[in-house]
Amino acid sequence: MCGYDDQRIAHQLTPALTSVQLAYNELGRMAVSYLCDGDDTAAHIRLVGKLQVRGSSQRT
């Protein structure tokens, strides 16, 4: 089982929840840049997150 956004509670659960850390700073910079460019065309952007493997995805 895996969560998304690696909130604090993820490592406090039993077993600790494997989760993907999101790149909030990069996401914010890209959003501001997109809005300031004035280009209203749709865009697909891929941001790489970091997988934090914890007990919820490990075999026992």
Image (cartoon, rainbow, N blue to C red):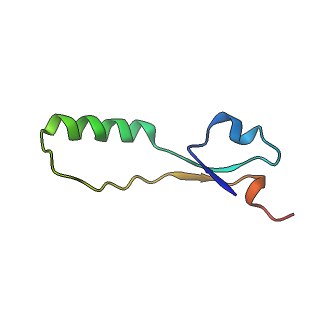
> What residue is drawn where x is 68% and y is 54%?
53
Looking at the rendered image, the quarter that the C terminus falls into is bottom right
On the image, the x and y values in percent for residue 11 come to 73, 41
Q: Nearer the viewer, residue 12 or 50?
A: 12
Instruction: Say whether residue 44 is left or right of residue 26.
Output: left
Q: Residue furthest bottom?
A: 59
Total residue callouts: 0
Residue 28, quarter of the rendered image: top left
On the image, the x and y values in percent for residue 55 come to 78, 53
> What residue is drawn where x is 17% and y is 34%?
36
Residue 48, quarter of the rendered image: bottom left
Q: Residue furthest right?
A: 60
Q: Is residue 50 above or below residue 31?
A: below
Q: Is residue 40 above or below residue 46?
A: above
> What residue is drawn where x is 65% and y is 55%?
2
On the image, the x and y values in percent for residue 40 come to 15, 45
Instruction: Say whether residue 42 is left or right of residue 56.
Output: left
On the image, the x and y values in percent for residue 57 come to 73, 60
Q: Is residue 54 above or below residue 11?
A: below
Looking at the rendered image, the quarter that the N terminus falls into is bottom right
Q: Is residue 41 above or below residue 13?
A: below
Instruction: Say whether residue 44 is left or right of residue 54.
Output: left
